[in-house]
Image: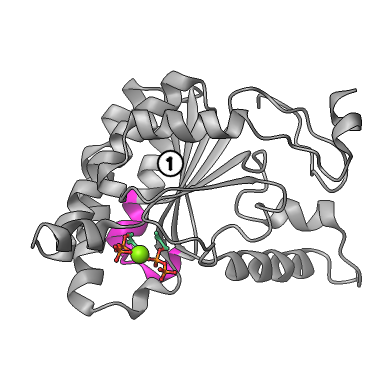
Amino acid sequence: MLRKLISPTQAIPEVAAVPQHIAIIMDGNGRWAKKRLLPRVAGHAVGVKRVRDIVKACAAQGVAYLTLFAFSSENWRRPEAEVSRLMELFVEALEDEVDRLIQNGVRLNVVGDLTRFSPRIQELVTAAEVRTAGCNRLTLTIAANYGGRWDILNAVNRWRAANPEATVIDETSLTEYLSLGDIPEPDLFIRTGGEQRISNFMLWQLAYTELYFTDIYWPDFNAEALAAAIQSYQHRERRFGRTSEQTHA
Ligand code: IPE
Ligand code: IPE
Ligand code: MG
């Protein structure tokens, strides 16, 4: 753990020049493919390659935590063929990438309601998490069948099960039960693909995150585009409710 877990609504966190936690909505695969007259799933395949590049680029920049939205709880609404291709790509990535993650010192963590995935995917996820557990250069969290509302409700329900006598929950207790409760909240949120919305991503954790939107489609997002996002972040003033003067004091 690089810094103490501080909730920005409870205390003012220290802010480093390089965001310690970046959370990304990897959007625009379908439109990237369509522009090239390719099937949407071709965009997803190229998108997987960009994950590899961006993990490396984040590690090189000194980012400690990277969280990627790979599949939302609402993405099941897509055509069945697209959903099954996404599942295949997930399996392929879990089969092929783990050695590379270990070489690069990347610990993998998958969050979301995994019970809806095939037993094969669930086994591969557990195996990959176990094999990379000792890696400490960067923690890569993949959000799959994840939704911010699911995360909050799941946390409340798990807290209730663990504390049947208690009636009131506080912020610290809830945080402990959230999917990403053991890592600092994101400093920087990036959404590629031009849409300016959160789409049910980390609703709780984004409370004081700096938001960055780019029109670049995910399959075109590279180390240079990441550096531009970090540069934008470095020009922000994170006040956490204070005045500018207080922030600089
Ligand atoms: C993001 O790209 C990948 C997933 C949601 C799995 P999209 O598939 O949403 O691409 P667009 O938004 O249709 O271009
Ligand atoms: C958000 O993208 C989910 C992921 C990138 C995994 P969507 O493409 O599903 O979001 P909407 O539907 O445009 O809001
Ligand atoms: Mg999209």
Q: Which residues are magenta?
A: 114-124
- Drawn side of residue 210 relative to residue 165, left or right: left
The N terminus: image quadrant: top right
Find residue 202 and report its horizontal and vertical position in percent. 59, 57
Tell me the quarter of the picture where residue 153 sits. Answer: bottom right
Find residue 60 and report its horizontal and vertical position in percent. 42, 19
Magenta stretch holds residue 156: no
Q: Which residue is mark 1?
A: 129
Find residue 74 and report its horizontal and vertical position in percent. 43, 74
Vertical arrangement, residue 85 with respect to residue 249, above or below? below
> For the point 46% across and 25% down, which residue is it?
135
Tag 1: Cα neighbours inside 10 Å, few (<14), some, or many (≥20)? some
> For the point 25% across and 70% down, which residue is it?
83
Q: How many labels sit on residues?
A: 1
What SS does tag 1 mark? helix
Vertical arrangement, residue 198 with respect to residue 8, above or below? below
Residue 133 appears in the figure: no
Q: Main secondary structure of the magenta part?
A: helix
> For the point 40% across and 57% down, which residue is it?
194
The C terminus: image quadrant: top right
- Drawn side of residue 84 relative to residue 25, left or right: left
Residue 71 appears in the figure: yes
